[in-house]
Image: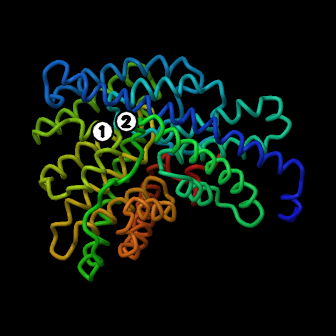
């Protein structure tokens, strides 16, 4: 059917209206979810240590915190409908979770993410948005109009995830690139997502200002000095991007192995995964003498701290952070619940800043290439990765765009080439890897 006829149809106009109406309540509930998660995280890693006499969490703090996270997660994964959400190693894909899975998703995220499971809130947020949209649409209407239900589910997911990406742009670009559609199909999906996320962003921003609550979204309040990339940035940038892609991809493969391991005897092995994550976080704090918070959480706040003052970080500490967090992230991908993107962005940024001491490679260039490469590897969405890196860098983005574009492609191509090598050697593709461009978020 021509696009003009679709836009004039009564059913599609009702779908647009419903998307706009759902945008506000979904954004409000997403705001409450993210704010509560951030407050619980602050209580666990700041208020409670101070209450017992520590200026910062001691090195052993992650051990009981992650043990508790594993014990909480076991009954959710084994008994709740939906198992607390998709496994993070599977990416942000899979069919939309229905309303019956919402209690498990919300409880798993609010009970374990603040305890330091090294995962982000993006996957639970998307599940929350799609589940609420389908709940509003109704089971009867979904069965009568399955395509409309899928579009509304994607609109709800886009609305929810746009709350932590600073607005609808990144979320909508992600949906467009992930769907892999063209022509009429693209606009049929795009318009409800854009409308719902735009309304939701307005509501979310308003509540953030009125209440004063922090949501811990992915942002860089301060960035290194703006510089124009030179030959040294590109000569070093491409091999550094390849190195970052290898690190992120092989950490992700740990998640694949862990997911297979936890598929049997899920209860005790889920606890074992959580304890292993706690040991790696504690090892980072013990080796570096720094706060375990830097390695424990999803990475939003840590990314801002790193970008604001990269010179305050010894290279050795950054390298230990990359090793410990990459291993912990890989284990968490297969055994715990949460989102895979935010920790990967921090891993790339930390490795990029650590390599910025190479002759000719600047700090701003290292930060930019690290973020975009890691995001491209974990999402397999190079355009979305470039847009996200550009928005995070703000005024610095215009000068860094050539390097961002090149390293986004380098990360994407490197990941696919390494996967091809793995398949030829008999290693199956990771569950989270998109079989086609964009499968990461398509329903």
Q: Residues within 10 Å of mark 1 (few under 14, many from 20)?
A: many
* Residue 131, disc: none
Residue 437 coordinates in the image, percent (x, y)? 57, 60
Residue 436 in sight from this viewpoint: no
Image quadrant containing the N terminus: bottom right
| Element on which disc 2 rests | helix
| Element on which disc 1 rests | helix
Residue 198 in sight from this viewpoint: yes
Residue at 49% x, 36% y is 87
Q: Looking at the image, do the residues carrying marks 2 and 1 touch, with CB atoms under 8 Å apart? A: yes
Q: Badge 1 is on which residue?
A: 328
Q: Residue furthest bottom?
A: 231
Q: Nearer the viewer, residue 313 or 185?
A: 313
Q: Residues within 10 Å of mark 2 (few under 14, many from 20)?
A: many
Q: Nearer the viewer, residue 242 or 45?
A: 45
Residue 75 coordinates in the image, percent (x, y)? 47, 16
Rendered position, 333 above or below 70: below
Q: CA distance from mark 2 to mark 1?
A: 6 Å
Figure colour scheme = rainbow
Q: Residue furthest front?
A: 210
Rendered position, 405 above or below 431: below
- Determine the image quadrant of residue 279: top left
Q: Badge 2 is on which residue?
A: 332
Tell me if 322 is positioned left or right of 28 in this view.
left
Residue at 57% x, 35% y is 28
Tell me if 8 is positioned left or right of 135 in this view.
right
Q: How many marks?
A: 2
Residue 266 coordinates in the image, percent (x, y)? 44, 23
Q: Nearer the viewer, residue 40 or 313?
A: 40
Residue at 28% x, 36% y is 296
Residue 32 coordinates in the image, percent (x, y)? 50, 31
């Amino acid at each position: 059917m021509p696009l003009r006829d679709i836009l004039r149809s009564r059913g599609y106009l009702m779908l647009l209206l419903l998307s706009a109406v759902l945008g506000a309540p979904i954004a409000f509930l997403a705001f409450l979810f993210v704010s509560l998660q951030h407050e619980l995280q602050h209580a666990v890693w700041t208020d409670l240590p101070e209450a017992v006499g520590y200026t910062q969490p001691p090195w052993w703090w992650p051990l009981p915190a992650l043990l508790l996270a594993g014990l909480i997660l076991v009954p959710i994964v084994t008994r709740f409908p939906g198992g607390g959400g998709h496994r993070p190693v599977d990416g942000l894909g899979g069919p939309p979770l229905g309303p019956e899975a919402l209690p498990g998703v919300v409880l798993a995220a609010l009970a374990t993410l603040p305890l330091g499971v090294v995962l982000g809130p993006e996957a639970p947020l998307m599940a929350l948005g799609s589940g609420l949209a389908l709940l509003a649409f109704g089971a009867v209407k979904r069965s009568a109009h399955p395509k409309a239900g899928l579009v509304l589910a994607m609109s709800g997911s886009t609305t929810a995830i746009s709350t932590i990406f600073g607005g609808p742009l990144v979320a909508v670009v992600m949906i467009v690139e992930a769907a892999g559609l063209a022509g009429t199909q693209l606009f049929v999906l795009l318009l409800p997502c854009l409308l719902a996320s735009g309304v939701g962003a307005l509501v979310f921003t308003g509540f953030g200002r009125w209440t004063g609550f922090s949501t811990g979204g992915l942002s860089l309040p301060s960035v290194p000095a703006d510089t124009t990339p030179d030959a040294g940035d590109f000569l070093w940038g491409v091999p550094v991007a390849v190195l970052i892609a290898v690190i992120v991809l092989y950490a992700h493969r740990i998640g694949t192995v862990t997911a297979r391991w936890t598929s049997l005897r899920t209860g005790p092995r889920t606890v074992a995964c959580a304890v292993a994550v706690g040991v790696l976080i504690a090892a980072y704090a013990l080796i570096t003498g720094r706060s375990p918070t830097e390695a424990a959480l999803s990475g939003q706040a840590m990314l801002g701290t790193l970008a604001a003052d990269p010179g305050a970080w010894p290279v050795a500490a950054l390298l230990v952070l990359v090793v410990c967090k990459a291993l912990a992230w890989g284990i968490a991908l297969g055994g715990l619940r949460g989102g895979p993107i935010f920790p990967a962005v921090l891993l790339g940024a930390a490795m990029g800043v650590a390599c910025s001491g190479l002759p000719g490679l600047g700090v701003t260039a290292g930060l930019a290439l690290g973020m975009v490469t890691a995001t491209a590897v974990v999402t397999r969405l190079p355009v979305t990765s470039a847009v996200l890196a550009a928005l995070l860098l703000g005024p610095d983005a215009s000068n860094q765009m050539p390097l961002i574009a090149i390293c986004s492609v380098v990360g994407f191509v490197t990941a696919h080439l390494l996967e091809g090598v793995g398949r030829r050697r008999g290693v199956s593709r990771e569950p989270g890897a998109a079989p086609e461009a964009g499968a990461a978020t398509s329903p």
